[in-house]
Amino acid sequence: MIPEKEVIHEFSNIGHNSGGRNFAGFAALSSSPVRELDPRAAQRLELSAGDLFQIDVTRHAGRVALLAFGHRGERREAAIGLGALHPLNLGAFESAALLGWITAKGGEADALSAIILDTMDEPLILRVSEPMTIWLAHLQERDGLVLGDAAGPVKYWHQAAEGRFALPDPLGHIREEFTVGRGTARAYELHAGDYVQIIDAEGQQCSDFQALRLRGLDKGQEWAIDSTATRSMVRRAYPGPGLLDKFFDAEMRPLFRVVQDTCGRHDTFGLACTARGYEERGYPGHLNCSDNISEALAPFGVARRSAWPAINFFWNTWMDAHHQIQTEESHSRPGDYVALQAMDDMACVTTACPDDIDPINGWNPTDIHVRIYSPETRIQRAVGYRKKEDAAMKISQHSAFHPRLSALTEHFAPARDLWAAVSFPADGSIGEYWACREAATLQDMSSLRKVDVIGPDAERLLQNAMTRDIARLAQWRGTYSLMCDSSGEVIDDGTLFRLGPQLYRWCCGTEESARWLEKLAKDGGFQVRIHDLGGSLPNLALQGPKSRDILRKVVFTQPHVPALDQLKWFGVTIARLHTREGSPFMLARSGYTGELGYEIFCAQSDALDIWDALSEAGAEHGMKPMGTEALDMIRIEAGLASASEFAPGHDALEAGLGFAVDMRKQDFIGKSALARNATAPRRVMRGLLLNCDDVPASGAPVFADERQVGIVTSATRSPMFERAIAMARLTVEHAEPGVELEVGQLDGRMKRLSATVTTIPFYDPKRERARA
């Protein structure tokens, strides 16, 4: 432990939100973040005796089923005394996870019953008297979800009993667990296939990790994790869940696979802290991780080192523009963790860093908790995701289409709270690109956000928030639009569909849309309900010239809604798979490719049936699955904006989105700023045709002679034009088509890529293919 010393006054960053230093992203340990249960979602909670549980089913939150179980899987609703059980309709929610859990516990999954919580006057608060598992299910029929009749997410809280810190839920059956006290280290063994979860219990606490092959130690060889070899193999500062997920030894042999990481900010450049490091800062005799590691590994016959190389989890370092290593307080919140899987028998050591004289541990060293799981646990890969800096953490999930995608590729990357396929090796990104241009592609786009706006003031709210004239939007029509702030800068973009006289569905890029709409509704006193559909409505993009022919084989529509062949560009309808009894889905003629295309929105339980039907129908047309890499090529050729074009300090006009701003409207948020800026524009969005295949990075400077006149926002190597192309924000004086400019590389000046200014879109400027 850290030597005793007289502490006259102490502090913690966790929960500190006063004075000049405010840590909004670090809630107090005693607080309980709000969590949300999406429509049709099911969630498991592990509660200990004395824990507090609260759920809010007020204000049209819908119905929620609650099931309680003891540690052996026996039913325990009687222990919480909430009244009678009612038959549970398994079709009213995504029930697979619940049924699988009950079966694993040896229970019967047939004819289940549950406590049904319907709309209440106030939130329900429970304090449980014994350990139990609670399952919550937000009940909602599939048809209602697709049609816009679903309730919004249900909010719930779980607060640990007083005096007990709520560690994250176990990832499976824990074989062993222990706490590494602050300022100490502990060694332990892992067998090949074992998982280890290293948890920052109280937040902003660094933890050095090192491991050596036991087979090597038996021969007197110390084969440890080598940071340099690892960085060389994964081509980044450290591995993470996904394709490049392994730590290597100096012989470039894999030692560990990173399975889950909820923090994503670590260090592999620095040593574990050393006695000399503290001595040179005036603290001789200070505890240090290198000595602690040596002492912990001594029983394994590992030679002592005065300075240990290590993986320092949760130490927040980065390389600045001048190649200097910088550091500040950790990003790690209470309960953040890294989960690794051993690929050989290993001797491991974990520390809880004792550094209390600089910010790396938030000036306040605390404990690290370690859990070990056997190989049978089968922990899925995931990263941490938060809707906002102070929101509850979620781990990324597989989309509803993952069982089909994972059979076709292993190359996935995080897309908000889901995993998105990057490319498919059977055809590669270039093959996927040409399939979209010449035939059809099918892509999982489930990470898009969907928000329903319902009520008598829905049009008034959206007319205030959107840059398009929503009053002109007819039922069964959609429009691409923007939300801007008072400066005219883009908050979010997306497509707004009108599904009914007072029912709209906004499909967009970020959760900021829902927060912005909620604020405007409250400030304006609008009578609306805003439903964030979360992950309950996965969607596919079927794009390409053959997409309509494919849909003709699978789409059934009722006479009271538009038929497939009646849908013009941005039209929308409600359809079913094959027949009037088939799976329901929302079908929109829209997309992100500039090609003829459609988007399909459905309930999770119908996702695989719809994927299979489209795959079968598309086979004769040469339809291919497509990933994000090919999509980026296509959307840049089509001149379609992404987050790279929405840079702070630049309004919607400078983002190249003036076509989506209707200045004829009486008013909307940001109109006055945009009208002012339009009279004397400074910068415009243009295309650059580069005279080479070198693809500049987003943010690369654009030069006219020696003066920087713009910046690249997005770039790719275009298969269509057989050269690199870029979207760039340029000063108006240098934005005329045909002007010759240069893109700077190697500090902007040591290498130049010649380019010619052109208009965007690069391809099909009249959008004739999308309108076909």
Image: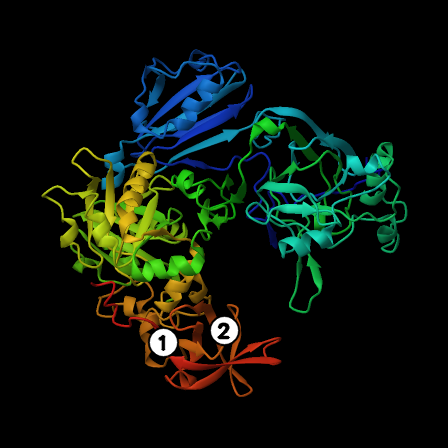
- Dot 1 falls on a residue whose secondary structure is helix
Instruction: Tell me the residue at 22%/58% (across/down).
Output: 470
Q: In the figure, residue 771 lies in which quadrant?
A: bottom left
Q: Nearer the viewer, residue 607 or 428?
A: 428
In the rendered structure, the answer to whether residue 500 lies left or right of residue 126 reads: left
Q: Which mark is residue 358?
A: none
Instruction: Tell me the residue at 82%/42% (across/down).
Output: 222
Q: Is residue 257 visible?
A: yes
In the rendered structure, the answer to whether residue 205 lies left or right of residue 245 reads: right
Instruction: Report which residue position mark 1 lands on.
Output: 677
Q: Is residue 118 visible?
A: no
Q: Nearer the viewer, residue 447 or 223?
A: 223
Please give the count of numbered marks on the rendered protein. 2
Q: CA distance from mark 2 to mark 1?
A: 35 Å
Q: Where the N terminus falls, by quadrant?
A: top right
Residue 529: x, y in percent? 28, 43
Q: In the figure, residue 117 lies in which quadrant?
A: top left
Disc 2 crowd rating (10 Å Cα; few below 14, some 14-19, many 20+) is some
**Amino acid type, mark 2:** Asp
Instruction: Report which residue position mark 2 lands on.
Output: 693
